[in-house]
Image: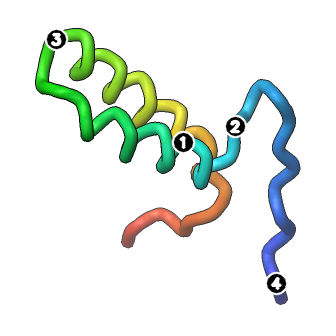
């Protein structure tokens, strides 16, 4: 049975948009600010994809 597609709203940006932001960020020079933003974006990505992947066994 197919899994339902999770509903996204403005408070939950979709993973593709977050991936795009991460790629753009990685083009910038390394800095503490970039590291903090990368961590923030990874947290958003994890939340956006939580319903898309099965947990590892």
Q: Determine whether, in the image, residue 11 is placed left or right of residue 45.
A: right
Q: Determine whether, in the image, residue 44 is placed left or right of residue 32.
A: right
Q: CA distance from mark 4 to mark 3?
A: 42 Å
Q: Residues within 10 Å of mark 4 (few under 14, many from 20)?
A: few
Q: Residue at x 47, y 63 (%)?
A: 55
Quadrant holding the C terminus: bottom left
Mark 2 residue element: loop
Q: CA distance from mark 2 to mark 4?
A: 23 Å
Residue labelled with disc 3: 32
Q: Quadrant of residue 3?
A: bottom right
Q: Quadrant of residue 54?
A: bottom right
Residue labelled with disc 1: 18
- Who comes first in sequence, dot 3 or dot 2? 2
Mark 3 residue element: helix
| Labelled disc at residue 13 | 2
Mark 4 residue element: loop
Nearer to the camera, 32 or 46:
32
Residue labelled with disc 4: 2
Q: What is the count of numbered marks?
A: 4
Say above or below: 16 vs 53.
above
Nearer to the camera, 40 or 2:
40
Q: Determine whether, in the image, residue 14 is placed left or right of residue 11.
A: left
Q: Determine whether, in the image, residue 25 is placed left or right of residue 49.
A: left
Say above or below: 16 vs 24.
below
Q: Residues within 10 Å of mark 3 (few under 14, many from 20)?
A: few
Nearer to the camera, 8 or 26:
26
Q: CA distance from mark 1 to mark 4?
A: 25 Å
Are circles 1 and 4 on residues that touch, CB within 8 Å?
no
């Amino acid at each position: 049975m197919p899994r339902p597609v999770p509903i996204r709203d403005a408070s939950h940006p979709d993973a593709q948009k977050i991936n795009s932001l991460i790629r753009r960020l990685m083009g910038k020079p390394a800095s503490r600010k970039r590291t903090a933003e990368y961590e923030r974006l990874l947290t958003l990505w994890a939340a956006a994809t939580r319903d898309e992947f099965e947990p590892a066994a």
